[in-house]
Image: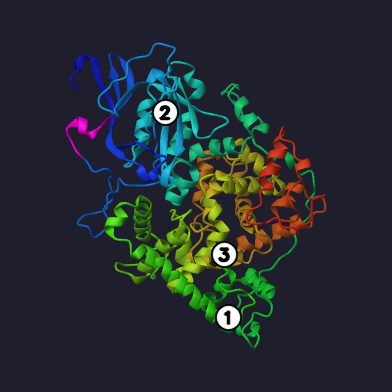
Amino acid sequence: MGENVEDYKLIFEKEGVYLHTNAKRSIQETSIPGFIRIVERAGQPALEWSPLEDEGRSAPAVLYSKKDGEGGEEDTNFDPGYEPDWAVISTVKKDREHAPMKDSGQWAFSLPLSELYSLRRARFSLGRNFMVLTSRGGHPLPPLHFHRGGTRELLRALHHYIVLDQSPVDGRLFLVYPRDSSSADFGPSFDKLHILDDGSDIVTRFIHDPYATTFGGFSKVTNFFRAALRPPEAAVTRGAQDPGLPSQPDDEPGFELITCGVELGPRPKVTRGQALVQWEEFLDSEGRVKDPEKVKDLVFRGGITPNLRKEVWKFLLGFYPWKSTSKEREEILRFKTDEYFRMKVQWKSVSEEQEMRNSLLRGYRSLIERDVNRTDRNNTFFSGNDNPGLTLLHDVLMTYCMYNFDLGYVQGMSDLLSPILFVTQNEVESFWCLTGFMDLVHQNFEESQEAMKQQLLQLSILLKALDPELCDFLDSQDSGSLCFCFRWLLIWFKREFSFEDILTLWEVLWTRLPCDNFHLLIACSILESQRGELIGSDHDFNTILKHINELTMKLDLQSVLLEAEVIYRQLVGCKDLPRQVKQVLGLCGPPSPAEESPDSQSSETERLLGQAEGGAASSHVPSCP
């Protein structure tokens, strides 16, 4: 480095950090590989980046993951989309003294940490994320992209010198404070960063590996969702409280809305029915389904016998219209087959050379290849090597990337496809059934997390109405956010029940009976079944989480479904049911703007509940009194 060894100390170093000379113009963008470092010069810490050329080394403009069959194993360090791919922008005021910036080439830089003011995530071309550093002035540096990960280690190293606190008005912005100024007040902010570091948001962490994420790192999720659901005013005033004091009841948004002084009344008796075993009797002479609502009701009450699933699922998932004739369905199948293979050809015809210039497709392929090799491998349809079921799983997921460019592939979709493919055992039919399923749940995987926040809030509202005592207990153990239910809602209980039970559960939910949010009532049913184990016990947050996770494969599906319907009928039968509960159950539309007040937590809850997913609140839904 050409410096006195006594004056220079290397604290942290990471290779494979690319400087993007024009991140907003992807067509003209140039990526320069280099090193990111934290160093101390004469005792003063600084963040530095330098190109590989300065190190006497060379590298291609972009580093790629190897695909299986290219002479080596896949590069497990390449994990697009799950490291928070941060970029750096630095600004320097001109009206004050600053430590000198190192000048070692056109793009290299060295920024003293004392000059660092804030850190932001930004997204530019091809959906890539960059970290944005801002110093206490106004001169920007080009963004940096961590192609091979490493932001977790960088932030941990920075933590020795600075503290980051999330902005109350911008979730992507973190303000920087010196480590020696009020550090105790800002310590929890790095927990938030660690959540982001596994994939920029909690949704992506679950998509990356829903099962493992539930077991690990969950101690940070409760506060994350509490902050996410709290109105901005509450987030600002929170820091003024003594961190040693217990949380106040108004910390949890919306819970004060439903004290449930309302008497719900006794729970009605409900029985489950037999599985749908006859199909032809529901078809007229031209093959139309004569009474779709009757079919849905039978499916809701008892599921479908295995030999009929292949046909009935195509109606439940929208591949065939309920009123289509046999002849029309033949035409639909021909059309959908042609459309599917047109999309499949799009990715099959991409040459390796082209793919090297398409990081998005390359990233999707890498993720799909990994997920396919670990999805339901205990099922005989996907077990063993060179299994044709695995090939179908891979091809359908790759084609979905062509069908839905905006969403592409996210981890967790293979979990949703495998039961469909197992039942249909047909590439084209499984693809179009998957698109129908994704129409119902795609919002679960969106980066904004709004759908998941809303569902957790709705679940809290339901549980508060049903069992205030259980809610109070969970609140007292920092579990009131119900974060342990996240995986349930994200992939519709896929990891909680056996493969065969999931086939029944999903076909019941696809009927959308008795309401669109029946999956939330299933969650309530499971939680209420555990109230005796939880209330009055010595459980704390960690043991509650452990207990809930240990329910996997131990739940009786028919009992859960039965109790969920009982809960629904009990709530619907209550004459004085709170409006927020009615909204969750689809018994009335969202509140009018005149009924909302932006200054209250009550209005914030109502606003979230009023954001209908996929037209849940249509014009025929009655208004709440």
Q: Which mark is residue 133?
A: 2
Q: Is residue 200 above or below residue 399?
A: above
Q: Earlier in the sequence, mark 3 or mark 2?
A: 2
Membership of 56 in magenta stretch? yes
Q: CB under 8 Å between callouts 1 and 2? A: no
Name the residue type under label 1.
Glu
Frontmost of labels 3 and 2 is 2
Q: 476 or 418: nearer the eye?
A: 418
Crowding at mark 1 (Cα within 10 Å: few <14, some 14-19, many 20+): some
Q: Earlier in the sequence, mark 3 or mark 1?
A: 1
Magenta-colored span? 50-58
Name the residue type under label 3.
Leu
Residue at 72% across / 47% down in the picture?
Answer: 465
- Image coordinates of residue 202 in percent, x first then y, are 49, 43
Between marks 1 and 2, how big is the CA–CA gap? 58 Å
- Image coordinates of residue 567 in percent, x first then y, are 70, 57
In the image, taking residue 322 as reference, residue 582 lies left or right, namely: right
Frontmost of labels 3 and 1 is 1
Residue at 40% across / 45% down in the picture?
Answer: 82
Q: CB under 8 Å between callouts 3 and 2? A: no
In the picture of the structure, the residue carrying the numbered disc 1 is 328
Q: How many marks?
A: 3
Q: Is residue 315 above or below residue 457?
A: below
Q: Is residue 428 above or below residue 256?
A: below
In the image, taking residue 253 as reference, residue 222 lies left or right, namely: left
In the image, taking residue 269 as reference, residue 420 lies left or right, namely: left
Membership of 244 in magenta stretch? no
Q: Quadrant of residue 8?
A: top left
In the picture of the structure, the residue carrying the numbered disc 3 is 505
